[in-house]
Amino acid sequence: MKYKPSVFNYYFDLDNDGIGIFNTLSNSIAELTPENYRNMKNFDENKFEADVKNALVSNGFLVPYILNEYDAINKKRVDSILNDKFSFYRILTTLDCNARCFYCYEGASSHEYMDLKTAEQTADFIIDHVENRRCTIQWFGGEPLMNTKVIDLISEKLRNKLTDDKIRFVMITNASLASPQIIEKMKNEWNLYLLQITLDGDSSEYERRKNYVSLEKPFELVINNIKNILQAGLKVSLRLNYDKNNYRSVCNLIKYLREQNFNGMSNFTIYSYPIFSSSQGFQSENTGWEEWFEIQKVLVENEFLSPLEAFSLRERRTQCYACSTKSLVVLPNGKLIKCTMAMKDSYAQVGDILNGIVNHDVMDKWCDTSLTKACSRCCFLPICQGGCRAGILNYTSDLCIHQKNFVGNVLRERIKHLRAASKQN
Ligand SMILES: C[S@@+](CC[C@H](N)C(=O)[O-])C[C@H]1O[C@@H](n2cnc3c(N)ncnc32)[C@H](O)[C@@H]1O
């Protein structure tokens, strides 16, 4: 069989003047001798030693000449967008929030709450439309815990109609209102599988950024609530939002979490995320690789991530939740949209819970399976799948994966850890 270099090969300089090669589809990484690098670039498969050629083929750096590699990647994304197995509903119980994060893409909170009639209709809408699919309900806001009656009602109705193996409940919350009574409900009545909770730094930075409306010692309170949630056996995914001004404080927070033994808990995971700009919120200063690196390094040092987890670029099956044809956001007034980044744009509404999807043109813009010209031939397609649809539709300036601007640095660090691991063995 004839071979050719994969279109998903990414070449990068190594610290020792060598050349590294990474394949964004197979996730393989290797060092090339100058000669093998030249043979890859001015491709001639007959010039490789047999064992080198075998290794290049088995790691996906060389692929069959007849293979169109984009076909498989595009199929995964298209299947996932058009899928008929999973439904996803992000339900905003309220637009109100007890925190006032300056960076929030939702902008200033409003006092709109879902009423019980709309909650009832939301549950009916989901029951009528879910068919045989597995379904995830994500509680969102504003702050979802500011309207627990709606969660009570919808959870009960859905749990009565759908078996527990068909429905999964998750929540995105700041956790400030997660009292012991609420945690009891989370576990036994709402059947929550996972909570995502955001922290923005150590005590003073967290309190400054969250800027809660009248809450005593919010950092202490939230840390304590997270401990109680974990003790109740629920999963927590902790999100660390960072920019140039708070990343050192985020590092201090990670050290504090280690001192508090969060690293030993199997139901606790942690990840960092750069603050992004949005059309209806705040304009962020671009964060670079230094901040990301520092945070990843501290996560490794404090045993929250292994080096290979921290310095990785993983394959993605699809773009994001908003692109799926079976995914909807339910606003407190019962209107349906595709993505919360577009919640203040009345033209972004695709329908409502009484009439279902009526605006198919808008729906099609979000679920378009085609890619922009730049994405369709990008070497990073397997790890990005076309980026943020809200970005393509101008609701945020962020399109590509954050690490795209410093992939070489990520891969050099990955190789360094792989070398150290192989020396130990
Ligand atoms: C809009 S809030 C709603 C749910 C809940 N109140 C909370 O605090 O998680 C959801 C999450 O969006 C994320 N978020 C909002 N604006 C952001 C921005 N500009 N950059 C990065 N993340 C942002 C934060 O992590 C926030 O916790």
Image: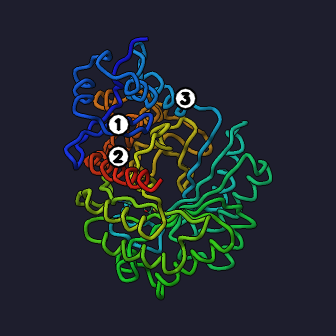
| Residue 48 coordinates in the image, percent (x, y) | 32, 22
Disc 2 Cβ-to-ligand 1 distance below 8 Å: no
Give the foreground label among 3 and 1. 1
Could you tell me if residue 240 is visible in this image? yes
Residue at x 69%, y 57% (from the top left corner) = 154
Q: Name the residue type under label 3.
A: Asp
Q: Earlier in the sequence, mark 3 or mark 1?
A: 3
Give the foreground label among 2 and 1. 1
- Per the model, the C-alpha gap separating discs 3 and 1 is 19 Å
Q: Which of marks 2 and 3 is nearer the N terminus?
A: 3
Q: Are marks 2 and 1 in contact (CB under 8 Å)?
A: yes
Q: Is residue 112 left or right of residue 6?
A: right
Q: Nearer the viewer, residue 134 or 149?
A: 134
- Residue farthest to the left? 17
Q: Is residue 396 above or below residue 10?
A: below
What residue does disc 1 label? Answer: 380
| Residue 414 coordinates in the image, percent (x, y) | 36, 50
Q: Nearer the viewer, residue 360 or 248?
A: 248
Tell me the tag on residue 401. Answer: 2
Residue at x 25%, y 30% (from the top left corner) = 37
Q: Is residue 295 above or below residue 401?
A: below
Which quadrant does the N terminus fall into? top left
Disc 1 Cβ-to-ligand 1 distance below 8 Å: no
